[in-house]
Image (tube, grey):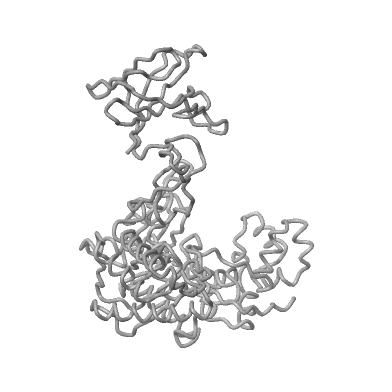
Amino acid sequence: MKPPILSARRYLALWLPFLPTDRLRLARCGNGAPQDEDTPFALVEKQNGAQRLYALTPAALRQGLAPGLSLADARARLPQLAVAEADHPADAKILALLAARCERHTPLTALDEPHGLVLDVTGCAHLFGGEAGLFARVLQDMEALGFCVRAALATTPDAARALARFSAGGVFTPEAEAAAITRAPLAALEMEDEILLALSRAGLKTLGDVAARSSRAFASRFGADFSRKIERLFGREDVRIKPLRPPPDCMVERHFADPLSQGEQVEAALSDLMLETALLLERRGQGGRVFEASFFRADGVVRRLQVETLRPTRDPKILLRLFHEKLEVLADPLDPGFGFDALRLAVPCAEKFALTQVDFSGAAAQETERELSELLDRLTTRFGRERVLRFVHLDTHEPERESPAVPVALATPAEWPAPAPGEPPVRPLTLFDPPQPIEVLALAPDGPPARFHWRKKSHDVLRAEGPERIASEWARLDPAPFGPEAPTRDYYSVEDVEGHRFWLFRRGLYERGDDTPRWFLHGLFA
């Protein structure tokens, strides 16, 4: 058998064998319902037209019942069996909550169905007094929440999963891990029953028996996946987990032996994290636009607050002010409950942050730009990014799309076209959405308007400039207002006898035979 490749990475696999029944038991305890641990209980679901056992309590397992058994057979063996319907969405929700709680130990946490989690704890053990301390802390947290859990810490996710589900678990050194995997039963392969039956008929009982044989023979019969599975179980191949949340570029955290319950304590700890984050970013020459604070409560609840800035920053004063703004407008206040036993500040995506030399000739303009940026940051934090908008210029001739309002966080700087010297603006400052229909009298069918009626008032046109013909863009697929089938528009800038200037257009052309061209008022010039 090949020796395992010693991996620098370490993975902690958690298996909750009674997760569905534990979830239901805890829910009933919360409602005040009495619980009897010795009463056999099972969750059932419909499989192939029959009600079958899906999950059982330890008391039901001790009576000889097993998942997959039909409910009729189970009731025949154990008439006093209590049952309830399985709820897979509720199981998935509670597992996701447990994964979020485990993020206090490592940001790299992944689901491991069924009813399991895998944590990449590489480089985290020293924060808890070593791997044994981390292992004990995770188990203690899970058991304190009322869940039965078995865990194993190994060099690959597959090995850790196998040792958690098919052995007594524990912290395994590479040497102990190889010996434990060798003794593991064939079921640890978690492959189809036909494959396991074929291996058993060949006289193989453990993974060690399989590893002692040539991998080519197995690959030719069972496929390449079989050989890869063996390689991963014995630590010769490491496949990284896919965490629920991508790892941040920069992260600092604090763990507290005595949970923080006072607002002043939480604020002071958060301020310390910001200072440490600023120093870390400064050493890297980086800044951030998004900062996320995670508050881990002692009862397992995790709250996250996120603030954004328009420009990269690492100023702790600015960040603390933004988090204050965020806390003040929370619909659901940040309740410490029994206290926060861990805080984390993360920068999901850091970017280059270059210090610029102050130009004293334009110091006033630079200061104004900085103040405007900070104001927009506070408004975005208080009201939300979708409510603080900025007009941007798009390179299109369609009036409705030329200057859309987008969130300031998404707006990119763009040059607005300046009018020719001495000439009035080409486009009006006010646009109606949708354009307002008007009645027009023109001297020729496709000519400029001579008089129009709008809002119960007639306007005699003194001057008219146009037409500016705007047709549909060939690349547009949407039908309105400028899709490929939209009628051509002829725009006119007109001035009435009172000096008011309007922007009118005729939709459709008589010369093309369009059906009843109509006139609209689209905008007002200042």
Residue 69, horizontal then vertical, whole percent: 46, 53
Instruction: Write down the quadrant of residue 438 in the picture.
Output: top left
Whether 312 is drawn above or below 130: the answer is above
- Quadrant that contains the N terminus: bottom right
Whether 298 is drawn above or below 491: the answer is below
Is 141 positioned to the left or the right of 484 in the image?
left
Residue 426, horizontal then vertical, whole percent: 43, 37
Q: Which residue is drawn at 38% across and 73% down?
A: 142
Q: Residue at x 33, y 38 (%)?
A: 430
Is 231 positioned to the left or the right of 285 in the image?
right
Whether 67 is drawn above or below 238: the answer is above
Residue 354, horizontal then vertical, whole percent: 52, 72
> Residue pushed farthest front?
422
Is 481 positioned to the left or the right of 9 in the image?
left
> Residue pushed farthest left?
32
Instruction: Write down the quadrant of residue 255 in the picture.
Output: bottom left
Q: Is residue 60 visible?
A: no
User: Nearest the camera: 490 or 238?
Assistant: 490
User: Nearest the camera: 204 or 347?
Assistant: 347
User: Nearest the camera: 170 or 458?
Assistant: 458
- Quadrant that contains the C terminus: top left
Q: How many marks?
A: 0
Residue 402, horizontal then vertical, whole percent: 45, 40
Instruction: Write down the quadrant of residue 344 in the picture.
Output: bottom left
Q: Can residue 25 be seen in this view?
A: yes
User: Nearest the camera: 258 or 113?
Assistant: 258
